[in-house]
Image (cartoon, grey):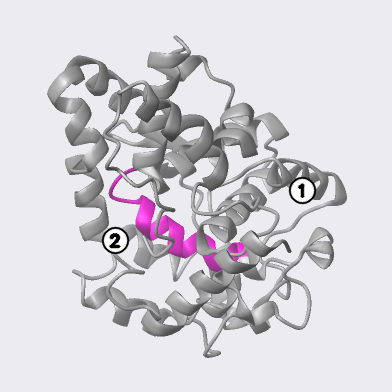
Amino acid sequence: MNKQESSVSRRKFLAYSSAAFGTGLIGGVAGSLFWASNNTAFLAFVKGRQNTILSKLARDVLPLQGRIIDVHFGDSIQRLVEAGVIAPQKFKAIYAKRGGVPAWMEELLTKPSSAPITMSFQSAPYLLNLLWPLGVATQTRFNTRSRLNGPNVGRYASTGGWTLGKASRGGGYFNKVAAVDLNPAQEAVILEAAKHCYRPCCNNSTFFQDCNHGSALLGLYELAASQGASENDLYKIGLIANSYWYPDEYVEMAYFFQKLKSTPWPRLAPKMVLGKTYSSFAGWQKNVHKPLITAGLVPSAQSGNPSNCGV
């Protein structure tokens, strides 16, 4: 782990340790309403000058009706419950403070589902916290090579931050549960995609799942590959998920490609967008955010700090 990656991981873990599942982490309803309002410095700045362009970009990147992903949970959540990775009562107690668990989520905690996943403003925060323990706990051959696999396994935001299982922290669940049935070929597809997918909160790939978003995307990839998804399918799925989990960064990215590269969002290759050049924090800041500032297309006062992994 290089110095930058190490500091980011420590920062995230300390944040999770102090807040656990407090005001930030399960921000489901509040977070989705915030996203839907588009009330950010970047979007407010652009709205006043390029409202038509922004409206089109927002529809392309984050349609309000959401996007249906041809992936279902099957019995994976029940396997996590049986293994103690998810303690339903802890889950419900947290959400009780925020309006309760939605009906579709309540069903997932108790029985298998063949319904395709819909990623939307409303569902994205809930899906993040269902997929997170799946990515942490699902047993795979490639996880033995993960940088999490070692004496410090419980000290990452993804593992130490998971407190909704029977154990107080999630480090003991890493790579321990047969939550998703995968053959070697499917694991190879997941690993290849995971190594090439980044997130704008840090400079780590999905394979190095050091935060909840990394674990959640890995869990989603595991479900998808087990149901026949190809590597290219995973990139498409990953871009949908990341866009709803990091709405500001990806709408700004679409604005960058539209204004400075003359390329509309639907024409971009998901693998390229998710790569280190654009979707890592350092890459996004250097290759998306700063060029827009230089061109006078976003306010220079906007800091471009890493996204909050607490949702």
Quadrant position of residue 198: top right
Give the magenta-colored segment's residue range. 120-135
In the picture shown, does residue 52 fall above or below 217? above
Residue at position x 17%, y 26% from top? 47
Relative to 221, residue 290 above or below? above
Disc 1: which residue: 191
In the rendering, at what x and y percent does residue 302 appear? 29, 43
Q: Amino acid at mark 1?
A: Leu
* Amino acid type indicated by mark 2: Gly
Q: Nearer the viewer, residue 251 or 244?
A: 251
Of residue 10 and residue 303, the one placed in the foreground of this image is: 303
Judge left or right: residue 115 versus residue 216: left
Q: Residue furthest top?
A: 262
Residue wearing tag 2? 28
Under tag 2, what secondary structure?
A: helix
Q: Is residue 179 left or right of residue 211?
A: right
At a point 46% along the width and 18% down the height, the residue shown is 266
Q: Earlier in the sequence, mark 2 or mark 1?
A: 2
Query: Crowding near pointer 1: few (<14 within 10 Å), some, many (20+)?
Result: many
Q: How much space separates mark 2 and mark 1, taking CA atoms?
A: 29 Å
